[in-house]
């Protein structure tokens, strides 16, 4: 079973219903490590050797964060700039992340339809994530579509609990599956896990 590292970054976690629900839903998953970057590094003084050791010890890397002004919180960029070093993550001799899968878990106030070429936000999530995708491809990682909880301000507690259950099921499935090529074809991992749940129903 593959080990999963969740790099969680939320500068206002105490005010987030959606992210609290998602993380509560992961309780008890032994192969999942939740690593809260803002809690660990409130002054952004990232311990690079420690982070690289964590990355080496896991097979799937998840960036989990709220979408703020069309991008991840600042500490994600700081983390990338420092941890994904030339000669370690990319470039000559930089092969420590090669073959590891990576994806984003995103919460947003905007709905799925608003993130489209015809929607209010003008671009689908996959286009907003291009810089992260290119950075991971430079590191020879396997880029997967995001899992997104969108329209969060309008979601009931019951719907948030359903998203949390799907997030948990997604991680347990990814820990067991090797069919990443099939997964790459969907727009959002939400669609892949929804299809998986349908197939599991009697």
Image: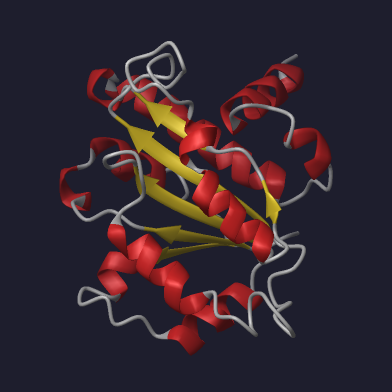
Image location of residue 191, percent across then percent down: 62, 23
- Residue drawn 69% across the image and 17% down it: 198
The answer to whether one can see residue 28 in this image is: no
Picture quadrant where residue 44 is located: bottom left
The answer to whether one can see residue 15 in this image is: yes
Picture quadrant where residue 55 is located: bottom right
Does residue 60 lie above or below 71 as drawn? below
Image location of residue 18, percent across then percent down: 30, 36
Please state which of residues 61 and 128 is positioned toward the viewer in this rendering: 128
- Residue drawn 74% across the image and 77% down it: 95
Image location of residue 29, percent across then percent down: 55, 55
Picture quadrant where residue 113 is located: top left
Image location of residue 88, percent across then percent down: 64, 83
- Residue drawn 82% across the image and 40% down it: 181
Total numbered labels = 0
Tell me the quadrant of the picture where the N terminus can be found. bottom right
Please identify the residue farthest to the bottom as the structure is shown.
49
- Residue drawn 54% across the image and 32% down it: 166
Tell me the quadrant of the picture where the C terminus can be found. top right
| Horizontal arrangement in the rendering, residue 202 relative to residue 44 (left or right) | right
| Horizontal arrangement in the rendering, residue 170 relative to residue 179 (left or right) | left
Does residue 27 lie above or below 75 as drawn? above
Please state which of residues 56 and 130 is positioned toward the viewer in this rendering: 130
Does residue 121 lie above or below 91 as drawn? above
Q: How is the image coloured?
A: secondary structure
């Amino acid at each position: 079973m593959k080990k999963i590292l969740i790099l969680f970054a939320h500068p206002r976690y105490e005010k987030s219903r959606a992210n609290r629900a998602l993380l509560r839903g992961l309780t008890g998953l032994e192969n999942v490590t939740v690593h809260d970057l803002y809690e660990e590094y409130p002054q952004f003084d990232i311990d690079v050797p420690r982070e690289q050791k964590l990355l080496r010890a896991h097979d799937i890397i998840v960036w989990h964060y709220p979408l703020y002004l069309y991008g991840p919180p600042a500490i994600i960029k700081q983390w990338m700039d420092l941890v994904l070093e030339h000669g370690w993550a990319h470039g000559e001799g930089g092969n420590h992340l090669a073959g590891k899968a990576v994806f984003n878990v995103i919460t947003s106030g905007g709905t799925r339809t608003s993130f489209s070429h015809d929607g209010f936000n003008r671009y689908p999530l996959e286009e907003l994530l291009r810089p992260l995708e290119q950075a991971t491809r430079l590191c020879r990682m396997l880029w997967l579509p995001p899992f997104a909880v969108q329209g969060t301000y309008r979601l009931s507690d019951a719907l948030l609990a359903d998203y949390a259950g799907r997030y948990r099921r997604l991680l347990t499935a990814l820990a067991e599956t090797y069919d990443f090529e099939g997964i790459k074809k969907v727009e959002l991992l939400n669609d892949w896990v929804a299809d998986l749940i349908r197939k599991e129903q009697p």
